[in-house]
Amino acid sequence: MLKRVVLLSLFLFIPTIAAAESSAPHEIRIGTLYAGSGAFASSSIPQYQGLRFWVRRVNARGGVFVKAYGRRIPVKLIAYNDQSQTGLAGSLYTQLITRDRVRILVADFGSVLTSVAIPLAEERQILLIDPTGTSAKFFRGNNRFLILTGLPSSGIWPTVLADFLIAHKIGRVAIIYSANDFTESQDQTLVSRIEAAGIHPVYNHAVANSTSSYTLLLHQAVARRAQALIELGYNNNDIALLQDLSAGGMHFAMVFTINPGLRVPLFLKAVGAQALGGTFTYVTPPSLAYNKVNYGLGLAAFKQAFEPWNRKHGNVPLGLSVIAGYNSGLIIQKALETAKRYDSVALRTAIRAVSGRLFTLDGLFKVDSRGNQIGEPIPLGQFFMSQEKLVLKVVYPAKVATAKPLYPAPRWGSGRG
Amino acid sequence: MNLLEYALLAGLFYGLYFALVGVGLNLIFGVMRIINLAHGDFLMLGAYGAFYLYHLLGWNPLWAIPIELVVFLLIGLPLYYLLVPRLQKSGDPEMLSFILFFGLSQVIEAAAVFVFSNNQRSIPASVFGGAPINIAGQVFPVSWIVSAAVGLAGIGLIYAYLYHSRPGRATRAIMAERSEAAATGISVNRISALAFGIGIAAAALAGIFSPFMIGAIEPSMGIGITVISFAIIVIGSLGNPIGTLLGGLIYGEALMLMQTYLASWSELLPYVLLILILLVRPTGLLERAVRSA
């Protein structure tokens, strides 16, 4: 009798065990888009490169460990070129979900190209990893499958900048911002914080994203006797502004732009050291090294491993976008390592569970209930000229500063300081 | 400081530069009745030429002028023989040119991404000297003055070529009536090839100064430049190179006034001007002049 029971049990359970084994996918499919051309290409391709580097590293070890199946499974990254076009991006995200059947989506660079992925991810219940789409609007609604990984939402970015203006009693502030979610939300945060401290901007104006000449706008700021000129835009805007400041001979006690600190080599080549000297900017990795890394490579090890591979595979400049792409891979890896099931809800729950405990080369990873990254405020940096060499240093807040701010900023060289 | 005065003077400099941006497109249309949608891409290539001469050899962008004029003229001549005679044999060369040159534009952009990468590039504005210039009590960047001067010189040279040289007179004869010009013994293909080369060289010449007037250089900048050029030549009259100067000045002034008083809307300017001119005077402001030229 006992023999019969054992045999019957085996007969019943063997197919179940086999079925469980066969239900494990032979690869983890991750879908993403990159902008091979167009306005966002110079930031999108490095972000994609960072993600590719993560995939190469995990696959070199036999894949990523997936707790739901108790074993390593190779990662397959499926990527399409959206050419910086939101219309094309929308159809390609759909293609990734419906035809390629990816379980995890990684959004393209920036808020503009991420915005079209959010409703699709919500509708199809797909985990959407958002490396750099930081628009504050994304995190006001109920987007259950969205996780911002690389940076805090843009509404948080200018908090340190606002504190600096207030602390240094800079009362005449001119702001020029590009008309898009990313910079509009920064403008709103900045204005509301400084106005709460009694500083009312003397000039606060939106301009088109494609604005390539700032001289007329700068003259308006000069006419209003602005001490600080804050320009919130993308790479092309910042390059044009710094060029126009340098050529026009105008000088402000403080000039702030977003991107030079995020992509130092690109700006150094585009506008030169003289035009950058004295400029205030955000500082993020790789210009900023966090030393408490407890997951993934630290910054020095990352540079050592990434740079030889990068030289053979596209050779993109190492900037924030590369770090954001790699960091997104790490968050996916941690989610797969800890989620009890391999589905969007379980993966997102796993990410929320590790929030606040994960320290990567991009700093503390901490998200709120809406998936908004709140881990690290972005410190303020300034470019210094030292023996004809340009150096970016953290100047505020004081607890992380590596140098004292030069305010008013001096004139360096023949152009603006 | 009077912002209106500044905007008007700045508009004059920008206008002279933008006339140079548009003149090559207009010359090619006037002679061949084809729309070179790759015009902005040739400008982009000219900009990269100046960028690499500066960054690799340390050459001032002014040295790029003679080099690029020769190089792009030499590129334009075989390109003409490769593309245009076949287009002219078709029933509707204007429409087919849209498709063909759009394709060429895409090919150039893709090749530029491959060769130059997608990173934005520029040339430091201090290359022309640091101190800005005072004109009529207003201070302007040296690079604006240089760009405007080159723009004016470029338009002047094309004017001189068209009105005071034998191939220029032949070019105008072809512009007036292609078949009649051929009947009088003018080598239509040779003259047209020369005009095509000059048109492309003019675009490259404008490209040299684009980092100072248009902003960062990137492979995808071409299509936007083509739209602006198209607006400029439609304002001045399609096929009339002299009208391009007027079109450029109107565009430059409108752009600077928009940036001063309606900065958020300045991106729409080329489209608004195109719609307005097509509604009010579809033949362009100087249409009559081209007939009597």
Image (cartoon, rainbow, N blue to C red):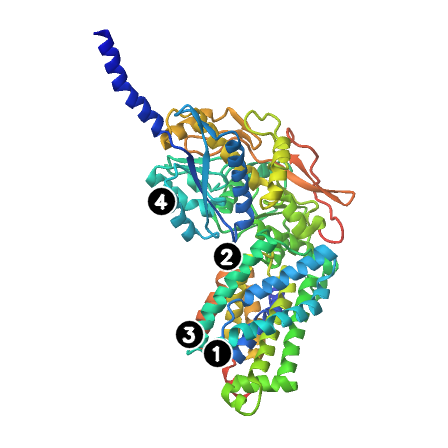
Where's the N terminus of chain A, which quadrant?
Answer: top left
Label placed on residue B264: 2
Viewer-side residue, B39 vs A279: B39
Residue situated in front as seen by the camera: A193 or B84: B84
Tag shown at residue B16:
none
Q: Estimate the x, y position of residue B19 in percent, counting from the top left.
A: 59, 72
Q: CA distance from mark 3 to mark 2?
A: 24 Å
Mark 1 touches mark 3? (CB < 8 Å): no
**Closest to the observer, B34 or A208:** B34
Which chain is indicated by disc 4? A
The percent position of residue A331, horizontal first and vertical second, equals 48, 31
For mark 1, name the chain.
B
Question: In this orientation, does residue A296 appear?
Answer: yes
How far, Cα to Cα, is label 2 from label 1? 42 Å
Q: Is residue A98 left or right of residue B79?
A: left
Residue at x 65%, y 86% (from the top left corner): B164
Classed neighbour count for the residue bearing mark 1: other residues with Cα under 10 Å, few (<14), some (14–19), many (≥20) = some
Badge 2, how many Cα within 10 Å: few under 14, some, many 20+? some
Q: Secondary structure at mark 3?
A: helix
Identify the residue under disc 4: A99
Which mark is in front, 4 or 2? 4
Tags 3 and 2 touching, CB below 8 Å: no
Q: Position of residue B230 (x, y in %)?
A: 51, 70
Mark pair 4, 3: CA separation: 46 Å
Amino acid type at circle 1 is: Gln
The Cα–Cα distance between marks 1 and 3, rounded to whole angstroms, is 30 Å
* Residue matched to label 3: B279
Task: Same chain for labels 4 and 3? Say yes or no.
Answer: no
Do callouts 3 and 2 point to residues on the same chain? yes
